[in-house]
Image (tube, rainbow, N blue to C red):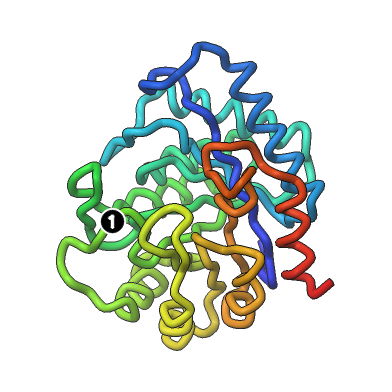
Amino acid sequence: MRLERTLIGMVHVPPLPGSPRWEGSMPRVTALALADARALLDGGMDALLVENHGDVPFTAGRVESATIAAMAVVVAEIRRALPDVPLGVNVLKNDARAALAIACAAGAQFIRVNVHAGAVVADQGIVQSDAYHTLRDRRLLDADVQLFADVQGKHAVPLAAVELEQEARDLVHRGLADALVVSGKATGEATPIADVKRVRSVVPAVPLLVGSGVTADTVSELLSVADGVIVGTFVKRDGDVRQPVDPERVRRLVAVARGR
């Protein structure tokens, strides 16, 4: 997947089977996810990233089999309905191996990994990276799936202090990430442009995405440094991440990003 001023829209999947807020209907889950996916693409977004956002609280380790199965169903349905869209998978908090398996089964092109290097302290406790097994799974599966890795991702802090620049280098040169994601401190919080520039300065040839807090007011400046943005909260109704995608907010952001 080539990244060049790429706009990736978040599909926040409702609670899945086994999670505390599961409501008992996979057809409803799939219909809501597909409705958001269509609204994002109809508004002009270039790609989609599907995430089990409704499954709070998240585990620090591997997710349950039911989560993997349900996510595969949702992603496969989006792929069937929208066969040409670049599609990604993120299994929260950090099950990259599950995301990779889903991507292979359902035909997605990339996965997002929140902790691909080192270890962090998050609301789940200590979350550790597993680049070793993730990259070996990709090799064994012969998967043409790119890996987008967060640099000191949101809702977490490094277990031991590490400079942003050093983590970026490690993710690329030791973790073999295909692209990097720089975010703010939490979902919907602005990503400091200074952090984006710091990461860009040390790995200038690696595709770079902004992963949180992108709005119609900030997207142009962010795209002057980054290769793309991942947008979730702003494009929801009233800017509320819990609401459905608002087509008008999508169109507004896309118009600004495209200089219309």
The residue to which callout 1 is attached is 156
Q: Is residue 60 left or right of residue 107?
A: left
Q: Is residue 68 above or below residue 24?
A: below
Counting from the top left corner in percent of width and height, residue 97 is at 41, 42
Count of numbered circles in the view: 1
Q: Is residue 181 above or below residue 108?
A: below
Residue shown at 62%/73% (left/top)?
227
Where is residue 258, by image quadrant? bottom right
Where is residue 31, by image quadrant? top right
Counting from the top left corner in percent of width and height, residue 152 is at 33, 65
Quadrant where the image shows the C terminus = bottom right
Residue shown at 24%/45% (left/top)?
123
Residue 31 vs residue 248, the one in the foreground: 248
Residue 139 vs residue 190, the one in the foreground: 190
Residue shown at 43%/80% (left/top)?
199
Question: Which residue type carries mark 1?
Answer: Ala
